[in-house]
């Protein structure tokens, strides 16, 4: 958040004050100088006028011919501009007085530019008698001279001030334009944008500084690209099959072990498809290994193209003739995949595929299964050619064996009704008009079927980096499988309604957390891929956050790496919108896609959370080198790295030595229920 005045505003204000101050003081000083200059001629003219009058009336004063004197004085005042003329005898008796009313009523600044002529007192002695003569000449002549001088000085000084202001404005504009260009470049660097700048103006220092910034940006960009290329090579060597560019057996094993260790906490069921290429040996023997490679690539590309609209699946190449497809029960119906693969492999079978294009077996992974157990069981099933569920039954079977479709409709109806009552499905929802107390009261109904838990992410200094929030669903007081709830919502086409209900409940619980705890703790909120892909959701969330912003703690929004890769435009739009509110962004499951990290270069993100499979395999030298390289890349562009699934002190120590910034796992702390705000 920007605080304080812009430099240009400060410079313009200071320059304007200095010029105005100099202008006013110059006018005042010139006026005083002119007044001082006119004092002498005014005094001389007053003395000469008094002496002239004295000579004119001295004879008549000796004769005490006052009527003649009055005629002389009347004639004199009619021909000479006087402001005052009095004559008194030695008894202070008034002989003559001329004191016309003063019509000059100027006040304020106009009075400052007017001269008041002095009253001259002259004693006339005639025959031992003394007469007092007072004379004050009129100031019109001198005021006219002073005003003419003032107007000339004002015009000259004003022109000079205008020229100075133009010069200062141009100089400040040059400075601020140069600084703005440098500021824009610095902000761009902080947002992982390494553009070159052409510094405007002619100032040598700014040109030098701009060149240094460009060189620094260029060096950072080059370092990032070199580290990324090196990291990409390492990924391909260790985790990627060179023929298909798919994750290899080692990546599959790491993913599987990480999933099995986190299954009890994430409630995320896992289904695998072991896919075999029965015709590969025949093609290699009879047509050559080149055609065999094309066959393998055709299988891999066909599977990816078939599942292109799905996000939460992973395809691995286990060996020369085997692929492993894994999918979470959270968003994808494994029966639908079974139908799609069966249809695909049937359609792709040609004469050259004597034993078929591909065959597969589907298996649900149980909590106590190891990777080798799963592969052994799947291999045996393929060899025995087990018959899968019929196509027709798969059409009608619902995603969860624990509940029927009708039961899920009844459970999810709570969320639909709550969303309708709270008006959550519109970007300009009426919920945005509620006060905080009214919002808390109206959303209390959500506490009956949603719980919120938090798990801290600790920094190297053992302080809380931020608390990640997790939702748990309840039905009649009993917990529901989280992945099954999401899958059911997806199947019933209310995933967005469920997402908005979860966000509403989460924000409800996070309101006023800082006030209650009297500390600035940040809280993480997970956003699903489907939500970010929906532009209406982003608009709705931003409006919601703006309405509640004063009561919310600092937030960190976590989005999946697969979301950023599959929907880059929507993801960038979401990230930019969140950053406009000065919240933070975390890329979750970072590295799980085994692709180049170049995609983060233009994203304004704060954290990356390494995929748990790397942390589970952290004791391997190759994985440690990969994690160290990834950390170096992220630190080089100002991104903090978080290690999740820390399950032992040994893993924690290794991650610490690799300069990772944040740590999360059940060996550090378990989930803590979030207090419900009333």
Image: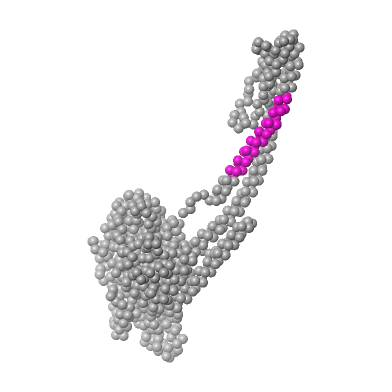
Q: Is residue 542 above or below residue 80?
A: below
Q: Is residue 424 magenta?
A: no
Which quarter of the picture shows residue 388?
bottom left
Queried whether the magenta region covers residue 35, the answer comes back as: yes
Find the residue positioned furthest to the bottom: 286
Residue 311 placement (x, y as % from top left):
39, 70
The x and y percentages for residue 465 are: 39, 61
What secondary structure characterizes most of the magenta part?
A: helix
Q: Is residue 419 visible?
A: no
Image: 2 above or below 532: above
Write the residue at 61% across / 57% down.
205
**Residue at point 32% right, 74% down?**
271
Name the side, left or right, on which 328 lies relative to 622.
Answer: left
Q: State the count of labels.
A: 0
User: Residue 165 placed where, x, y %?
Assistant: 63, 46
Q: Which residues are magenta?
A: 16-45
Where residue 427 sits, quadrant-wise, is bottom left
The quarter holding residue 58 reads top right
Give the percent coordinates (x, y) of residue 331.
34, 69
Q: Residue at x 39, y 86 (%)?
A: 279
């Amino acid at each position: 958040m920007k605080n304080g005045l812009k430099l240009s505003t400060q410079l313009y204000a200071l320059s304007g004050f200095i010029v105005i101050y100099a202008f006013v003081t110059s006018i005042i000083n010139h006026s005083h100088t002119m007044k001082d200059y006119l004092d002498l001629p005014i005094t001389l003219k007053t003395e000469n006028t008094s002496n002239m009058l004295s000579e004119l009336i001295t004879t008549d004063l000796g004769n005490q011919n006052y009527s003649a004197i009055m005629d002389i004085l009347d004639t004199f005042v009619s021909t000479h501009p006087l402001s005052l003329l009095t004559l008194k005898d030695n008894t202070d008796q008034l002989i003559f007085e001329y004191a016309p009313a003063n019509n000059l009523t100027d006040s304020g600044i106009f009075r400052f530019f007017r001269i008041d002529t002095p009253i001259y007192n002259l004693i006339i002695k005639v025959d031992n008698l003394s007469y007092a003569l007072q004379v004050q000449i009129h100031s019109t002549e001198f005021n006219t001279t002073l005003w003419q001088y003032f107007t000339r000085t004002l015009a000259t000084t004003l022109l000079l001030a205008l020229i100075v202001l133009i010069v200062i404005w141009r100089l400040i504009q040059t400075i601020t334009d140069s600084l703005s260009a440098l500021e824009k470049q610095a902000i761009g660097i902080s947002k992982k944008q390494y553009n070159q700048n052409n510094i405007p103006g002619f100032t040598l220092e700014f040109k030098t500084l701009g060149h240094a910034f460009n060189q620094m940006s260029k060096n950072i960009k080059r370092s990032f690209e070199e580290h990324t290329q090196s990291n990409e090579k390492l990924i391909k060597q260790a985790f990627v099959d060179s023929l298909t560019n798919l994750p290899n057996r080692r990546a599959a094993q790491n993913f599987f072990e990480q999933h099995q260790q986190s299954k009890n906490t994430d409630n995320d069921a896992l289904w695998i498809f072991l896919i075999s290429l029965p015709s590969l040996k025949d093609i290699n023997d009879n047509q050559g290994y080149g055609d065999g490679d094309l066959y393998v690539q055709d299988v891999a590309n066909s599977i990816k193209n078939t599942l292109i609209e799905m996000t939460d699946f992973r395809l691995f190449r286990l060996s020369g003739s085997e692929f492993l497809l894994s999918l979470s029960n959270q968003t994808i119906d494994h029966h639908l995949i079974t139908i799609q693969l069966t249809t695909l492999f049937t359609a792709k079978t040609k004469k050259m595929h004597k034993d078929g294009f591909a065959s597969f077996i589907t298996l649900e992974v149980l909590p106590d299964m190891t990777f080798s157990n799963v592969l052994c069981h799947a291999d045996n099933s393929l060899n025995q050619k087990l018959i899968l569920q019929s196509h027709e039954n798969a059409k009608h079977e619902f995603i969860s064996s624990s509940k029927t479709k009708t039961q899920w409709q009844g459970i999810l109806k709570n969320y639909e009704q709550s969303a309708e009552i709270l008006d959550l499905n519109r970007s300009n929802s009426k919920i945005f008009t509620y006060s905080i107390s009214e919002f808390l009261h109206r959303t209390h109904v959500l506490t009956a079927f949603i719980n919120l838990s938090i798990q801290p992410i600790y920094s190297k200094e053992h302080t809380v980096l931020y608390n990640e929030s997790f939702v748990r669903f309840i039905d009649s007081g009993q917990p529901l499988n989280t992945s099954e709830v999401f899958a059911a919502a997806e199947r019933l086409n209310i995933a967005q309604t469920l997402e908005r209900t979860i966000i509403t409940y989460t924000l409800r619980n996070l309101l006023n957390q800082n006030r209650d705890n009297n500390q600035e703790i940040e809280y993480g909120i997970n956003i699903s891929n489907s939500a970010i892909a929906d532009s209406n959701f982003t608009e709705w969330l931003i409006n919601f956050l703006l309405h509640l912003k004063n009561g919310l703690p600092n937030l960190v929004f976590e989005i999946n790496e697969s979301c950023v890769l599959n929907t880059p435009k929507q993801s960038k739009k979401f990230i930019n919108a969140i950053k406009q509110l000065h919240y933070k962004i975390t890329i979750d499951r970072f590295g799980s896609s085994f692709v180049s990290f170049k995609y983060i270069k233009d994203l304004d993100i704060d954290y990356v959370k390494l995929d748990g499979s790397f942390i589970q395999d952290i004791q391997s030298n190759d994985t440690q080198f990969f994690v160290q390289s990834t950390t170096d890349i992220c630190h080089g562009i100002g991104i903090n790295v978080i290690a999740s699934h820390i399950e032992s002190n040994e893993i924690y120590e290794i991650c610490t030595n690799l300069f990772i910034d944040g740590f999360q796992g059940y060996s550090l702390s378990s989930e803590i229920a979030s207090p419900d705000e009333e």
